[in-house]
Image (cartoon, grey):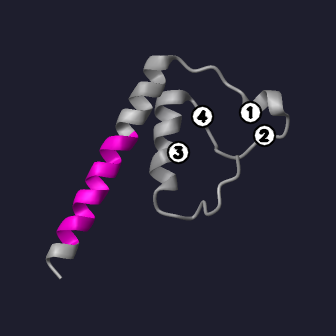
Amino acid sequence: MTYRNKTEAHWEPLLTIARDELGIQSFDPIGKPSADIRMCRVDEIGRALERAYDLGLLVGNGVKRAASTV
């Protein structure tokens, strides 16, 4: 999977979630395809998705609030 723009603001929080919940240290391929495959428990994936969703709500709410004050 190739990511187009890793400098966007959302990548760092998503990588933090991936580290905390899934033990993923980088979104960059390691080189060997088998090394890029990892087993994750369903509850770990659920927690990671929940945190990412919550982050999206917070960011969206902040953007909405900022737009309404302009």
Numbered mark located on residue 24 in the image:
4
Q: Which numbered disc flags the more N-terminal residue, 1 or 4?
A: 4
Q: Which numbered disc flags the more N-terminal residue, 2 or 1?
A: 2
Report the front residue among 21 and 37: 37
- Using the image, determine if residue 3 lies above or below residue 29: below
Q: Amino acid at mark 4?
A: Ile
Alpha carbon separation for disc pair 2 and 3 = 16 Å
Q: Residues within 10 Å of mark 1 (few under 14, many from 20)?
A: few
Alpha carbon separation for disc pair 2 and 4 = 11 Å
Q: Amino acid at mark 3?
A: Leu
Q: Give percent across and percent down for residue 59.
A: 30, 57
Q: Which numbered disc flags the more N-terminal residue, 3 or 4?
A: 3
The kind of secondary structure element at disc 4 is: loop
Discs 3, 4 touching: Cβ within 8 Å: yes
Q: Amino acid at mark 1?
A: Asp
To which residue does mark 1 refer? 36
Residue drawn at x 84%, y 40% as measured from the top left: 31
Numbered mark located on residue 15 in the image:
3
Discs 2, 1 touching: Cβ within 8 Å: yes
Alpha carbon separation for disc pair 1 and 4 = 10 Å
In the image, the segment drawn in magenta is 52-66
To which residue does mark 2 refer? 30
Q: Amino acid at mark 2?
A: Ile
